[in-house]
Amino acid sequence: MTRSILDEAHIHPAIRATISDSHADVVREVQAAIAAHPVVVVGMAQNPFPRKARKILDGLGQPYHYLEYGSYLSQWRRRNALKMWTGWPTMPMVFVRGVLVGGAQELQKLVDQGQFSALLAA
């Protein structure tokens, strides 16, 4: 899989630190959670899809770590840093054993197809 990312050679040296430091704390926080927990859900308030993902996991009896960043009216820049880091455009972001599997709909598909347990066991 490839996705277009502006090559560093095309970013002026004077702004590279600004780009790399922009909300790096939130990315590090999510990376630490992914390293520490088998299942991580990253979401936001007021959005029903993070709740759906958590409900799916609760129904399976699967423990998970939940991180919430703002709502539709707050912390969008912090969420944007996560979206740029992962390439995933929406909330939630569900990680299983360090692998981004998508959001609530993609999680449900994995469960329905019997693939969630295999990912968890890997």
Image (spheres, grey):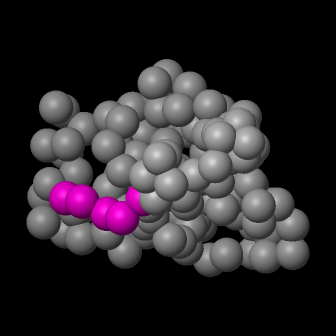
**Does the image show residue 29?**
yes
Task: Choose between 59 and 48: the one closer to the eye.
Answer: 48
In the image, residue 119 lies in the stretch drawn in magenta: no
Q: Is residue 21 left or right of residue 34?
A: right
Task: Choose between 76 and 22: the one closer to the eye.
Answer: 22
Measuring 19% from the left and 68% from the top, which residue is drawn there?
112
Q: Is residue 40 above or below residue 103?
A: above
Residue 12: image x %, image y %?
A: 64, 49
Picture quadrant where residue 2 is located: bottom left
In the image, residue 4 lies in the stretch drawn in magenta: yes
Task: Choose between 14 and 68: the one closer to the eye.
Answer: 14
Q: Is residue 86 above or below residue 14?
A: below
Q: Which residues are magenta?
A: 1-5
**Does the image show residue 55?**
no
Measuring 55% from the left and 60% from the top, which residue is drawn there?
83
Measuring 50% from the left and 54% from the top, which residue is drawn there?
10
Residue 85: image x %, image y %?
A: 51, 50
Which quadrant of the rendered structure holds the C terminus?
top left
Q: Is residue 59 left or right of residue 67?
A: left
Residue 46: image x %, image y %?
A: 75, 75
